[in-house]
Amino acid sequence: MSKEQKEFFYSVLKNEQKVYSSLVKKVFFDALSSAYPLFYKEVDKKKFEKIVCKFMQHGAKNIKMWKMPNEFRLFIKKKKLFREIAYVDDLLWFEWSEVKLMMKNYKTGLPQKFSYKNEYKLSKSCVMKKLKYRVFEKGSFEEKGTYYLLGFYDFMEYRIVYKEISFPLYIFLKKMDKTGLKKTRKSISEMSDQSKKDVKKFFRDTLNELNSLHVLSPN
């Protein structure tokens, strides 16, 4: 191979590498800006692009493309990036949870009638989170407080639904997912100084509704 041929070969190779690198960068950029549309509207676009490049080099590892946004979310949290946005972690979790729930394969039939005689846990079609900012409501992202959010896949409308829930229900569901319904009923009774009968009555309608929405899963 002559000198001219070598130079031409390396020139072509270098250009192909640039094109490939540019395409990969675009794939990451498009995927992340699409996965986090609310977050993307809030950030400086040049800074976002710069952070995406850093993420490509040091944070992207999962071969499943749909899981990459979660790696990006964890990368931002670990590296403490975009700290000028106080609610960044809550907002990214909120948007990622929707992607996560939409990407799951659900196989479910009609739910069985709710009964305190059975044991339950939270289903895979739902998420629950304690938040510091009201990121689930447009125009209120900066509103600081304590919010308990339940998100679930609506099998009737084929979409993700989010509901703000009360602290007692949050504690009940969290404990139920770990220890089961019967132990949770006893624990809540002791915590609230209410009888088990009163605890059952207080939560019955809500649990019945959540069961009909596939938020509860028989254990």
Image: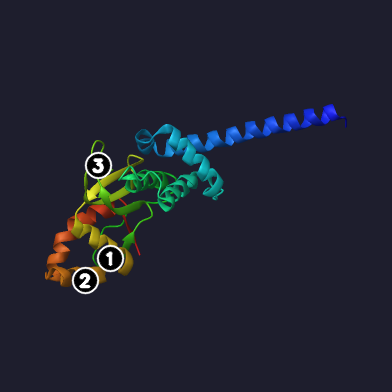
Mark 1 in CB contact with mark 2 (< 8 angstroms): yes
Q: Is residue 51 left or right of residue 128?
A: right
Percent across and percent down for residue 71 are 47, 49
Q: Residue furthest front?
A: 3
Q: What number is the disc on residue 204?
A: none
Q: Amino acid at mark 3?
A: Glu
* Residue wearing tag 2: 187
Toward the viewer: 90 or 12? 12
Q: Amino acid at mark 2?
A: Ser
Which residue does the image show at 12% across and 66% down from the upper left?
A: 198
Percent across and percent down for residue 213 are 29, 50
Q: Amino acid at mark 1?
A: Lys
Percent across and percent down for residue 94 are 34, 46
- On-image quarter of the C terminus: bottom left
Confirm whether residue 88 shows in the render: yes
* Residue wearing tag 1: 175
Mark 1 in CB contact with mark 3 (< 8 angstroms): no
* Residue wearing tag 3: 142
Tell me the CA gap for discs 1 and 2. Answer: 9 Å
Sooner in the amino-acid sequence: mark 1 or mark 3: 3
Toward the viewer: 178 or 217? 178
Sooner in the amino-acid sequence: mark 3 or mark 2: 3
What secondary structure is found at the residue carrying circle 3?
loop
